[in-house]
Amino acid sequence: MEKNISFTLRVWRQRNPKAKGQFVEYKMKDIPGDTSFLEMFDILNEELVNKGEEPIVFDHDCREGICGMCSLYVNGHPHGPSSGVTTCQIYMRKFKDGETITVEPWRSAGFPVIRDLMVDRSAFDKIMQAGGYVNVNTGAPQDANAILIPKDVAEEAMDAAACVGCGACVAACKNGSAMLFVSAKVSQLNILPQGKVEADRRAKAMLSKMDELGFGNCTNTRACEAECPKSISISHIARLNRHFIKAKLKD
């Protein structure tokens, strides 16, 4: 049987992007250990609404570790203290009774705060629009095996495609760089035969858009890899750099 815990929740509250934010403390009592982190926020928000207070705004959707929207900075770690999982997969048994838990939004120039713990991550959509696609001739559908892809190549592309675009890499990076996200999205296309024709151009376009949107530069501290909930490897960053250099040489 799960043990109940009581703790202090220290949450960042900010009414809008231009307002001055601050931390507000809430006392949480007898929360079951098998309660997920987001369910704990649901409990708190229900209490706040019953008191006539404004509930805490936070982002979420699937609550199954698939969408990456549960982008919370918990006790100094993107998505919380556990590795290889998103915030919605963290359970309160992970914390100690009497502990103070500090929750913040992603901190990045590329992710401005909308309200409280919710940030605007549309910059990632703009990066994808810059080159996250392939141009192919359309017509009659091809057979599934018309383009043969070696198993190891397909698996590496799928590993890159596991990136859910949550932004934990940006939040973890001291420079606010989005290189791990960009490199994963470039790799999932560039590795495959369908994406090789415009591979270099894609890398240049997406990297240039990243810079334009205010994200920082990569200095290979590997914090992004350590905090990524899908364990995306920084080897993709090396591939991205190679494609980018080739594109610049062609110019």
Image (spheres, rainbow, N blue to C red):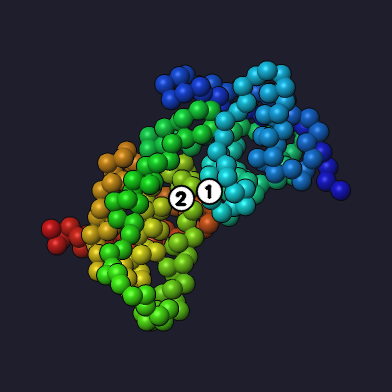
Left or right of 96 in this view: 118 = left
In x, y percent, where is residue 93? 75, 44
Q: Quadrant of residue 215?
A: top left
State the residue in front, 209 or 4. Answer: 209
In x, y percent, where is residue 19? 45, 19
Is 211 above or below relative to 150? above
The disc labelled 1 sits on which kind of residue? Answer: Gly
Q: Which element carries disc 1, helix, strand or loop?
A: loop
Q: Please report the residue visible at 44 percent of the width from the left and 73 percent of the height from the top.
A: 154
Q: Residue furthest left?
A: 251
Residue hosting label 2: 165
Whether residue 175 is visible: no
Q: Please report the residue visible at 38 percent of the width from the left and 34 percent of the height from the top.
A: 109
Left or right of 198 in this view: 220 = right
State the residue in front, 108 or 77. Answer: 108
| Cα–Cα span, label 2 and label 1 | 7 Å
**How many neighbours does mark 2 have within 10 angstroms: few (below 14), some (14-19), or many (20 or more)?**
many
Left or right of 174 in this view: 130 = left
In x, y percent, where is residue 140? 33, 75
In x, y percent, where is residue 149? 39, 79
Residue hosting label 1: 68
Report if the CB atoms under discs 2 and 1 are less than 8 Å apart: yes
Left or right of 152 in this view: 102 = right
The disc labelled 2 sits on which kind of residue? Answer: Gly
Q: Please report the residue visible at 86 percent of the width from the left and 48 percent of the height from the top.
A: 1
Q: Residue furthest right?
A: 1
- On-image quarter of the C terminus: bottom left
Which of the two labelled residues, at mark 2 and mark 1, occupies the earlier sequence position?
1
Whether residue 71 is visible: yes
